[in-house]
Amino acid sequence: MNSNLVNTEILSKETGLDSLGNTSCIYPKDLTTQEPVSTALDDINLCAEISPALSDVEPPKIKSPKNSSPSGNFINFGLSGNQTNQRDTTIPIGQSHLSEVLNLEYLASYHKPIEFNYENNNVEILVTGATGFIASHIVERLLLRGYKVRGTIRSLESSTYNYLEALPYAKQNLRLVEANLLNSSIWNEVIKDCQVVIHCASPYSMDFNDPYVDIINPAVEGTKNVIDACCLCNDVKTVVLTSSIAAIVGDYENGKVYSEADWNEVSNPLIEPYLYSKTAAERLAHRTIDEQRPDLNLIVVNVGMTIGPSFRTDINQSVQWIYDMISGGIPTLVDFQTGWIDVRDVAEIHIRLFETKESHGRYICVQGMHTLQDIARIIKVTKPHLKTPSIVIPTFLAKLFISLFTSKSAACFLKKTMGKHILISNAKLVSHLSDYKFIPIEESLTDTCTDLQNKFKIQSSLFSFLRS
C-alpha cells in the first residue's frame, strides 16, 4: 500500500519523530554573473486602488529599488553588491546566507534537492496574494526552480513583503506589482505574458463584521476578475486555483469517505462565509472556464488544515490552533478531526501539478486525518518541554459551551463537526503524483512549534493544571 494514502483506520496513538536527512537546495554557481534580462513589465500599468474605468488607469507603479540597472529595463529585488555573489552552491536545511543581513531564517525543507533549471527562466508565472502563508512558499519554490515570478501584493508602500525580496533569486526573477482583487480593470495587464497563473489570494477568517464585504465578495469577485482575465489572455495556458477541503466537506457525515466528486452544499453564507466562499469561488472558476475558454487547463488544489513554518510574522488560522494548544489558548480539547497538510507540501504540489502532464481538475491535498488529540500527543512526544491539553471534553458538553469561547462562525462549524470522524481521501493526488512523499505530521508539527517559539514567547497559562 502506498504510504501516502490516507487510511480509514483509526490513527495509532503511538507517535515518534522520524530521523531527518541533511537535504540541501542546489544553486548554479554562475547564475549571479549573468546579465539581467529585460521584461515587458516595464510598460505595465498597475496600481491598487484605481477607478474601474479604463481611461482612469494610473501610471505604472512597479517598485524600482536603489540597485536597479542604469537602463531601467530590469527591476532588481533583494541584496545588492557582492553579497549575492558570495553564496555557496548549497543551503542546508535551516541555514540562510541572508540570515546575518536580514535576520530571516531560510525555511526550505525538501525531500530532494531542487535544481535550478535555466529552461524555466523562459516561463513567467503569476502568483496572486504573493505575501500569503501558502503563496510565499510557492514563490520561493518557483524561484528555486528558475521560473520568473510575478507576484501581486496589496501595496508596494508596505514593508510586509521584505521576506519575499530576500528569497534566493528574487533579485533576478521576482517582480512585485500592486493589484486589487476587486478592480476588474487591471487584471488583463497584470496577467499579460504569463503562461501559468496561480491564484492564491483569498481572505481566510472566521471573524468578520459583514460576511459579504469581508469574506465572500473578495473571494468570489476576486476569483471572477482573475479567471476572466485568464480566459482573455492567450498567453495563459494553465490556471492553478488554491481552494480548500471546505469546498468539498460541508455536512461532515460520520463515517463518510469524501473525494473530489463531493461539494459543500450546506454552508450558510451569513454564518459560515469562509466555507461558503470557497465553494462559490471554485464553482465560478470551473463554470467560467467551461463557458469562455474550454481549452484553458484548470487545476484546483483543495488544501486541508495547513501548518508549518512561515515567512510571515503573524499567525494564519490553521497554525493558530497549534499556537493556542502550546500557549494555553485552548485549555482542553474537543473531539474534532480533519485533514492536515504541511505548507511546504502544499507549495510543492501546486508546482508539480502544473509541471505534470495530464493534471486537470480537483486534487484533495491532505497528508492524513488527525484529531486534535492526535496533534496534542504528537507535540508532547516531539516537543516534550511544551505543555499541551490532555483532557477531551465530551461532545455534548462542548456543544453547550463552545459559543462562550469562540466566534459564532467557528462555533457553528465545530458544533456540526465535533464527534464525527470522516475520511477525506487524497487517493487521486497520490495516484497522480505517485513518487511524491508527504512531510510526516511529526516533522510538520515540530517545525511549526519551533517557528512559533522563535517568534513568540510561549508561557504557561492559568489552565496549566489541565495540560501535560
Image: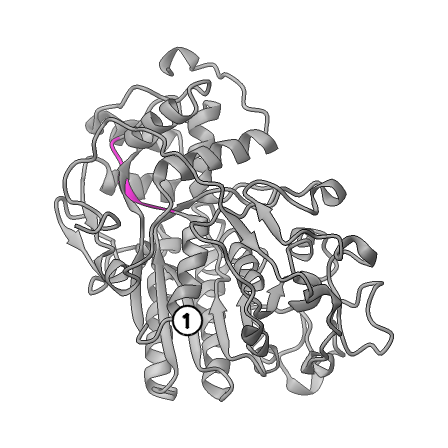
Q: Which residue occupies the foreground of this view, 181 or 370? A: 370
As drawn, the residue found furthest toward the left would be: 255
Q: Position of residue 309 (x, y in %)?
A: 51, 42
Instruction: Find residue 377 and report its image quarter.
Output: top left
Which secondary structure is most common in the magenta stretch?
A: strand
Quarter holding the C terminus is top left
Q: Position of residue 276 (x, y in %)?
A: 34, 58
Q: Please, is residue 419 above or below residue 326 in the view?
A: below
For image coordinates 41% across by 37% down, the residue present is 443
Q: Coloring scheme of the render?
A: one colour
Q: Secondary structure at mark 1?
A: helix
Residue 265 belongs to magenta span: no
- Which residues fall within the magenta stretch? 335-341
For image coordinates 57% across by 67% down, the residue present is 146
Q: Please, is residue 58 above or below residue 116 in the view?
A: below
Q: Amino acid at mark 1?
A: Glu
Left or right position of 30 against 385? right
Q: Identify the residue under disc 1.
A: 355
Instruction: Find residue 30 and report its image quarter.
Output: bottom right
For image coordinates 45% across by 25% down, the residue present is 326
Left or right position of 95 against 374? right
Q: Report if residue 76 is visible in the image.
A: yes
Q: Report if residue 124 is visible in the image.
A: no
Q: Position of residue 259 (x, y in %)?
A: 20, 59
Q: Which residue occupies the foreground of this view, 96 or 428? A: 96
Q: Please, is residue 206 above or below residue 418 in the view?
A: below
